[in-house]
Amino acid sequence: MKLSIKQAMKPLAAILIVELVGAIGVIFTFPALAGWYATLNKPWFNPPGWVFSPVWTMLYALMGIAVWLVWEKGLKNKKVRASLFAFGGQFVLNVLWSILFFGLHSTLYGLVDIMLLLIAIAFTIIKFYSVSKTASALLVPYILWVGFAAALNFYVWRLN
């Protein structure tokens, strides 16, 4: 089976869109790293700063592929639309976390958001499963990482 350029561009477009939207958080994160965030007490399991960028880049790529796998099933399908809506909702919470935690310097608001985000990701995984088991599985590393990030957020809130 030979893919047309148009067919090949769809997964790349989905990945690029997710990566670009995900990068919005960097606008709020980067300026706070050397100042406010550096002054906070952190738990012993806080990874070095260089870990976050490659992990998020990989997770956003997996999310983009998952979105494409669902999207390719056709927007006329009610389950596809519901799944993509769920994805959009959790993605808003994802970006909002950076705004709350780093932009507003609120470990508490960040914690509330990330707990809602975990629920929203779980809901999205369930919705994706009804359309594409592969797409659903591609979100598992994401929910695991956000669970780890939630633990970090909790301990940063508690220690400060």
Image: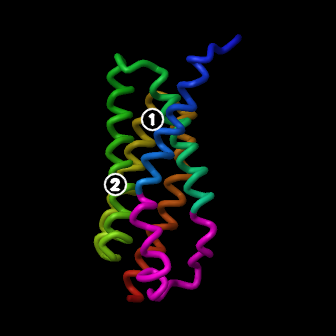
Residue 108 against residue 129 in the figure, above or below: below
- The vertical placement of 95 against 154, above or below, is above
Which segment did they paint magenta?
25-52
Image coordinates for residue 20, horizontal then vertical, percent: 47, 46
Split into 4 quadrants, where in the image is the C terminus?
A: bottom left
Q: Secondary structure at mark 2?
A: helix
Residue 34 visible? The answer is yes
Q: Secondary structure at mark 1?
A: helix
Residue 124, how many percent across, how many down?
Answer: 40, 42
Tally the marks. 2
Q: Is residue 114 visible?
A: no
Say which mark, if any, is on residue 109: none
Q: Is residue 106 above or below residue 119?
A: below
Kindly indicate the quadrant of the structure image that contains residue 5: top right
Q: Left or right: where does residue 22 sit relative to residue 133?
A: left
Tell me, for residue 128, which label it has, or none: 1
Which residue is depicted at the point 52% across and 84% down? 43
Kindly identify the residue that appears in the image at 37 percent across and 81 percent down.
157
Q: Magenta stretch: residue 127 in it?
A: no
Q: Which residue is mark 2?
A: 93
Three-letter amino acid code at the position of disc 2 = Leu
